[in-house]
């Protein structure tokens, strides 16, 4: 026999009996389940890594009878059997039953025919040709029979949150930060069925940090970290070991708004504190807005994800402007796309910035249904150009229009984008042999410095989807010139970056190749 358990999680215990600001989920377990297996079932449902996090379980017995604090059943009454026997032989009850038999008090009940469940549409995908020397193969061999639905935790209403909790003055200050261009994003609802199409059309290849998508016109669409940089404008190259702080580094922002915390807070705590407002200064409001935006949009994750004090230190001293947030966001996104989709789940969680996948397909498609999405302008980064109209576009429509009837091609960076984003190896943007930049590697490429928002949001003349990239000589000349400028404007971080051998390194090396949402990209012991 099974038992349904209602779970309330990610909330706050006000006292021993009062639990507030929680989320609700549920599981079904057997009556004989052990406590350890119960914890494992809860962890699996909530995507919690029990090897790194401890689950605290409390329960409340719902009070049904105030006198004895438990439910009362007929079988618990000592006189129940005797009373039931008397009731069966009561003449009054016998008379009532007799009347029912003769139909004196019976009612006519119309039985509605059971509605037949509509059969789900059969999911089909194009057959791959095996005539070539290296035949193409789908990564997911067999189309899953269970539904594939996605849960995303990214905040597409961050501008409304800014207006409500920090005000116009702080929003104007936010526009001058590296994340300022994102304030110009139009309605950006995530269309999860696009991701389903991508997964079912993904091809086998050797680089786990790339997506190869089969299109009906014979083109293989390729999505990698350089494409992510073109779409978002975020920095994707850099050595995260450069961002380190000594032990016991004092962070006034952290102590001021999280006085009880030690070295980290959860995303839920950050969001709740941000929505409380009551800032001591506009500068504090700006810095908390930056952290709120990073962890609800750029690094979208579940509520119990730990946020290190290192993030607060970087925002407080301004070094966050040089941190490769795009590298971290892309790593989380591509990692969440590598989960096993053959295992049936109610929802598959995506992390990082999953909306970038939608924008990538919009840019690759030569023609889009205006009922799905419309291009409103031509600026960089490209994520600011689109307005989503159909929040729940159907899988069948997307598969038949964008991926079968539509001619798609890989996106090509313009000269303006090469100059703004310093894509030094643009000719290898879709090479499967180039891995993600590792933190321990010596990066011979110049890190593209963050440009002011007014330089990012310049209109550009988009090249056609089939046009080749700029001539090699012209591109090489552009890179050499930009490298000289970068050498002149390279910020001196010697005063803020400690060099002692005992310093704690804020490094991506502590992360697995495809990190989970619970991973912390920096920590101070």
Image: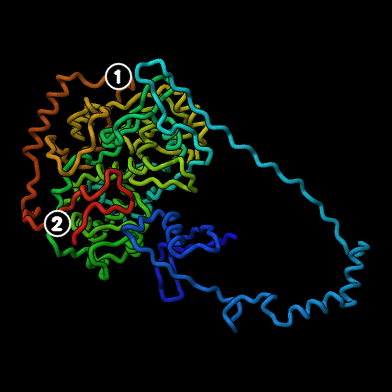
Of the 4 image quadrants, the one containing the N terminus is bottom right
Would you say residue 302 is visible in this rendering? yes
Percent position of residue 425, x then y: 19, 29
Q: Left or right? Give the position of 208 relative to 41.
A: left
Question: In the picture, residue 194 is in which quadrant?
Answer: top left
Q: Report helix, strand or loop for mark 1.
A: loop
Binning the other alpha carbons within 10 Å of mark 1 as few (below 14), some (14 to 19) or many (20 upward) gives few
Q: Is residue 265 above or below residue 193?
A: below
Percent position of residue 270, x then y: 32, 60
Quick one: which residue is furthest to the bottom in this view? 67
Residue drawn at x 53%, y 38% is 145
Residue occupied by mark 2: 504
Question: In the picture, residue 279 is in which quadrant?
Answer: bottom left
Q: Earlier in the sequence, mark 2 or mark 1?
A: 1
Residue drawn at x 51%, y 58% is 26
Q: Is residue 444 above or below residue 261?
A: above
Front: mark 2 or 1: 2
Residue occupied by mark 1: 467
Tag of residue 228: none
Q: Left or right? Give the position of 254 relative to 132.
A: left
Of the 4 image quadrants, the one containing the C terminus is bottom left
Residue drawn at x 35%, y 16% is 133
Q: Is residue 161 above or below residue 185?
A: below
Q: Nearer the viewer, residue 480 or 81?
A: 81
Question: In the picture, residue 9 is in which quadrant?
Answer: bottom left
């Amino acid at each position: 026999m099974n038992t349904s358990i209602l779970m309330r999680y990610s909330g706050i215990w006000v006292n021993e009996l009062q639990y507030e600001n929680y989320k609700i989920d549920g599981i079904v377990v057997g009556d004989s389940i052990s406590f350890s297996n119960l914890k494992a079932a809860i962890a699996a449902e909530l995507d919690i890594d029990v090897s790194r996090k401890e689950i605290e379980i409390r329960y409340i017995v719902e009070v049904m009878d105030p006198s004895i604090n438990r439910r009362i059943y007929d079988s618990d009454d000592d006189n129940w059997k005797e009373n039931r026997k008397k009731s069966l032989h009561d003449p009054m009850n016998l008379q009532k039953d007799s009347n029912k038999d003769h139909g004196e008090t019976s009612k006519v009940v119309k039985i509605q025919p059971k509605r037949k469940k509509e059969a789900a549409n059969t999911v089909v995908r194009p057959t791959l040709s095996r005539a070539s020397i290296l035949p193409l193969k789908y990564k997911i061999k067999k189309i899953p029979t269970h539904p594939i639905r996605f849960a995303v935790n990214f905040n597409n209403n961050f501008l409304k949150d800014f207006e409500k909790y920090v005000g116009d003055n702080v929003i104007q200050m936010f526009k001058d930060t590296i994340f300022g261009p994102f304030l110009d994003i139009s309605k950006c609802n995530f269309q999860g069925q696009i991701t389903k199409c991508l997964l079912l059309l993904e091809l086998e290849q050797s680089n786990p940090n790339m997506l190869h998508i089969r299109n009906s016109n014979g083109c293989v669409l390729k999505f990698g970290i350089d494409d992510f940089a073109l779409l978002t404008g975020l920095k994707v190259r850099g050595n995260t070991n450069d961002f380190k702080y000594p032990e016991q580094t004092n962070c006034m922002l952290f102590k001021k708004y999280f006085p009880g915390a030690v070295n980290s807070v959860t995303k839920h705590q950050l969001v709740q504190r941000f929505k409380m407002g009551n800032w001591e200064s506009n500068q504090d409001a700006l810095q908390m807005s930056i952290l709120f935006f990073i962890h609800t949009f750029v690094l979208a994750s579940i509520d119990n994800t730990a946020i290190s004090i290192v993030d607060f230190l970087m925002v407080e001293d301004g070094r966050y402007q040089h941190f490769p947030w795009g590298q971290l966001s892309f790593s989380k996104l591509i990692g969440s796309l590598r989960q096993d989709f053959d295992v049936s789940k109610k929802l598959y969680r995506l992390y990082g910035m999953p909306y970038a996948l939608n924008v990538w397909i919009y840019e690759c498609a030569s023609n889009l249904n205006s009922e799905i999405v419309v291009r409103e302008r031509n600026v960089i980064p490209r994520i600011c150009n689109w307005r989503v109209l159909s929040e729940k576009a159907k899988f069948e429509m997307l598969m038949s229009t964008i991926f079968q009837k539509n001619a798609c091609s890989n996106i090509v960076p313009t000269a303006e984008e090469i100059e703004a984003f310093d894509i030094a190896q643009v000719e290898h943007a879709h090479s499967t042999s180039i891995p993600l930049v590792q933190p321990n590697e010596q990066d011979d490429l110049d890190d593209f410095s963050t440009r002011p928002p007014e330089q990012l949001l310049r209109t550009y003349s988009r090249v056609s989807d089939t046009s080749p990239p700029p001539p090699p000589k012209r591109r090489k000349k552009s890179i050499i010139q930009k490298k000289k400028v970068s050498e002149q404007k390279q910020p001196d971080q010697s005063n803020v970056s400690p060099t002692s051998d005992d310093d704690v390194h804020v490094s991506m090396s502590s992360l697995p190749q495809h990190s989970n949402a619970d991973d912390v990209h920096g920590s101070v012991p």
